[in-house]
Image (tube, rainbow, N blue to C red):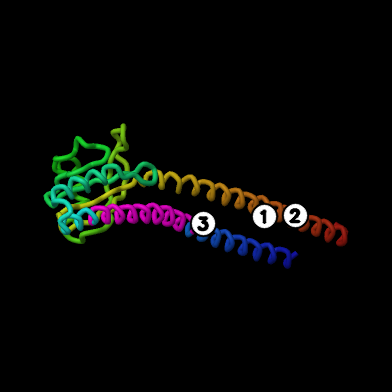
Amino acid sequence: MFMKSSSSRRLLVLWLALAGIGAVILVASLQQLHRSLLEERTRVLEDRVRAAYQQVDNFHLLALNGDITRQQAQIAALSTLRQLRYADDEYFWVLDDRGTVLMHAVLPDLEGAALAGISANLDAAVQPVMSGMGRGFFEYQWPRVGDTLEVDKIGFLIHFDPWGWGIASSVYTDDINQAFWDEANNLILIGAILLAVLIIFWFGFEKSLFMDMNDYRRSRDLADGR
């Protein structure tokens, strides 16, 4: 009986260790999932803004070569960016160095307005990139089209030095969080089911061990004539 009890304790320790390892793997998997979803979204975002930057630079070169005037080049560049779309109907917008919106592909009423007056949180996010780094990611909140609730977005901006423009686009990330939690709930459910199976198996093992010990005691009592 002592050997069975010792085996029971060892088995419990083993299961606890496996449960701990499983929990660590689960957390690491969830972190990797969120990181992968965000990296894929930001990679596409950066690639598209770089492509838009190249479009503007092409018009700039036409002006430098004398094929068109600088003003014509800028008008054509803004018109081209206004029409560009990618992914899930994502779009571009352009600022000047004073923080004025020169072009917004889906909200043209914002054009000519100061970004600080439109959205303080967006202005605060963009200005460090415009004034310092020249290119980079920024995070802010903005409502979806037709809604008033502000949700998380991440943007990428490249400063076009020859014209003093900030060429930017951004994507919503609230759906990434939703996809993450959907998958997290699935993994947590699987983990809970496995844990429940282990608990049931453990109690079954303990019950069997308890019954064996009772049988052993009764056999010993009979042998002793009790």
Instruction: Give the labeled residue for mark 2.
Output: 208
Picture residue at 43% right of the left edge, 44% below the top? 178
Mark sitting earlier along the chain (1/2): 1
Instruction: Give the labeled residue for mark 1.
Output: 202
In the image, is 94 to the left or to the right of 183? left
Q: Nearer the viewer, residue 216 or 115?
A: 115
Picture residue at 85% right of the left edge, 58% below the top? 219
The Cα–Cα distance between marks 1 and 2, rounded to whole angstroms, is 10 Å
In the image, is 209 to the left or to the right of 222? left
Instruction: Give the labeled residue for mark 3.
Output: 26
The Cα–Cα distance between marks 1 and 3, rounded to whole angstroms, is 22 Å
Q: Position of residue 70 (x, y in %)?
A: 13, 52
Q: Secondary structure at mark 3?
A: helix
Mark sitting earlier along the chain (2/3): 3
Amino acid on which disc 2 is placed: Ser
Picture residue at 73% right of the left edge, 55% below the top? 210
Q: Which residues are magenta?
A: 29-57
Badge 3 crowding class, 10 Å Cα cut-off, few under 14, some 14 to 19, many 20 or more, is some
Q: Position of residue 170 (x, y in %)?
A: 30, 48
44 falls in the magenta region = yes
Nearer the viewer's eye, disc 1 or disc 3? 3
In the image, is 191 to the left or to the right of 53? right
Q: Position of residue 117 (x, y in %)?
A: 14, 41
The Cα–Cα distance between marks 2 and 3, rounded to whole angstroms, is 32 Å
Q: Is residue 4 above or below residue 123?
A: below
Amino acid on which disc 3 is placed: Leu
Classify residue 158 by image quadrant. Answer: bottom left
Amino acid on which disc 1 is placed: Trp
